Image (cartoon, rainbow, N blue to C red):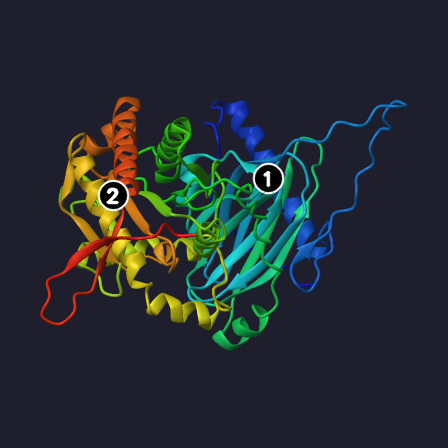
Amino acid sequence: MRMVQTTWHITRFPCAAPPVGGLAIRARAWALLWALALAVAGLCGPAAAQDATGSIARPSPARASAPDGASAPAPGPTLAHDARLAGDAGRTRLVVDLDRSVDIRTFTLANPYRVVVDLDNVVFTLSPEAAQMQRGLVSACRYGVLAPGKARMVLDATGPVTIDKAFILDAVDDQPARLVVDLVPTDAQTFARTSAARPAAVAPAAITPAANGDARPVIVIDPGHGGIDSGTTGYSSYTEKSIVLETGLALRDKLEKTGVYRVVMTRSTDTFIPLGERVRIARAHQAALFISLHADALARNDGRARGASVYTLSDTASDADAARLAEQENKADLIAGVDLSDESEAVAGILVDLAQRETRSFSAHFARELVQRLKNVARTHHGALKSAGFRVLRAHDVPSVLVELGYMSSKDDLKLLTSDAWRDQATDAMVAAIDEFFATKTAPTPPAAGQTARAEPAKSPN
C-alpha cells in the first residue's frame, strides 16, 4: 500500500493570544496532532450524515431527567469561538470551533460564487481578524445573526466550487466540537447543477397591523445592515450596523414620546433583514414615511469627505458618489447570502418605473426639510441632497429617504457618530423635520397650459 502525505497550511484566528514557553509549545503540538487525527477521521466517516441539500441532522444527546414537576432549562446559544482556513487552491478547509455540536445546512450561490453555512442558535465570539481570513478557494468570509435562532457564515469563493464535505465533529476530551467544510474547485456547469437545490428561505416575520381606530401616521425607521452584514467600518473598530441601530432606537424613543406617531422598526436588534423585507414592512404597515439610516466610508487615501447626506430614489444617480453608494448598499443581500434569482418580475417593473409622482414629491419634500434641520446641528456633505437607485427606497406608495449620517472614514465624523451628545442633537433635528413634514405636507399639482405651478394640500396616505 502506498501512503500519500497531504500537507495542510493553516491560517488560524484565535480569540486570545496563545501561551508561551516550552511546555506550551509541546502542548500545542500534541493538540494540533490530535485535531488533525480527528479531522482525518472525519474525512473517512463524518460524525453526522449529510443529506442531498447539505443539511445535517444531529442525534439528540442523552439528557438527565428533570425532577418531577420541573422542566429542564433550555440550553443557551452555542458559542463559535475560533475559526481558521487551511489548504490551497486545490482544496480548502474551513474549521470552526464550537462549545457543542449544532445542526448545519450548506449550499452554494452564484453571481458571485458563494458558499453558505447556516447554523442553528449559534453566537459568534471570534476575534476581529476572523472576518479578514482568506486562503485558497476563499477570498472573503462573513458571519453573524441571520434571524432569531439562526446564524450564517458566507464564504466568497474565487470561482465555482463544490462542497466536498460538510460535517460536525463532536467534542472529544479537551478538543471542542468542530464544524468542518471542505471545498474543491469545479466548473461552472457542475456548480450550476449542484447549487440548484438549497434550503427554503427563512420565512418573513409576521406583521401586526395598526390597532383599529389608531389614525396616527406610521413612521418606519430602518437601521441599515445588521447581523451578518456589518456595513462599513471606516477602518475602525466600530461597525456601521451598530452606529445606525443606536441612532434608530434613539429616534424611535423620541418619536414615541410625542404620542403623535406610531413607530415601527425594521430591526431593533443585531439581526439581518433583507432589503425586500424592509420594503415589505413599510408597505404592510401603510407607512406615511420611511427613513433608512446608514453611514458612509471612502477607501483609504480616497479623499477626506465629511458630513451627512440625504438621498431619495431616482432611476439615474445625481452624481458619481451617489451611484457608488447605491451600488454598495444594494449589495447587502448578496453579502448575507440571499438568493435573488427568484425576484419577482412584477416587483422589478415597479422598481424601474419608480413610484407614483405624489410619493416622489413627498420624499423630496421631506429630504429638503431634513437637510435644513441637520445643517443646524451637524455638518452636512457638500450637495447634501442626492438621489440614486437604492433598492430599500422602492416602496412605490411610501415616501422614503436614506440618511447617510456621516463618513466613518473621517476621524472627525466618526467621533461624532459615536458620541451620545451628537446623536441626541441629530435625532432632535430629525424629529423636528418629521413634525414639519406632517404639518405642511403638500403635493405639487402639474400646471395647466399657460399657468404657473402651485401647491395644494394632499391627503395623507392610507
In this rendering, the label closer to the viewer, 2 or 1: 2
Question: The residue tagged with tag 1: helix, strand or loop?
Answer: strand
In the image, residue 383 above or below residue 356 = above
Q: Which mark is residue 440?
A: 2
Residue 148 in view, yes or no: yes
Please name whichever residue, 72 or 55, is drawn nearer the observer in this view of the structure: 72
Q: Rate crowding at label 1 as few (under 14), some (14 to 19) or many (20 or more) other CA atoms within 10 Å.
A: many
Relative to 81, residue 276 above or below: below
- The residue identified by callout 1 is 122
Work out whether mark 2 precedes mark 1 in sequence or the reverse, and give the earlier one. 1
Which sits in the foreground, 409 or 275? Answer: 275
Residue sticking out furthest to the bottom: 189
Find residue 80 and report its horizontal and vertical position in percent. Answer: 57, 37
Q: In this view, which residue lies farthest toward the right?
A: 68
Q: Nearer the viewer, residue 462 or 134?
A: 462
| For residue 331, side relative to residue 181 (left or right) | left
Residue at horizontal 54%, vertical 53%? 93
Q: What amino acid is at disc 2?
A: Thr
For residue 377, side relative to residue 35 (left or right): left
Label annotation for residue 435: none
> For the residues marked 2 and 1, what is the alpha-carbon distance in whole angstroms?
48 Å
> Of helix, strand and loop, which one carries label 2?
helix
Residue that appears at 38% across and 58% down = 397
Residue 295 in view: no
Residue type highlighted by circle 1: Val
Compared across the picture, whether 344 is left or right of 375 comes to right
Q: Position of residue 424 (x, y in %)?
A: 29, 25
Residue at point 61%, 40% (across, down):
33
Quadrant housing residue 131: top left
Where does the image place residue 340, in percent across and percent down from the top left? 47, 64
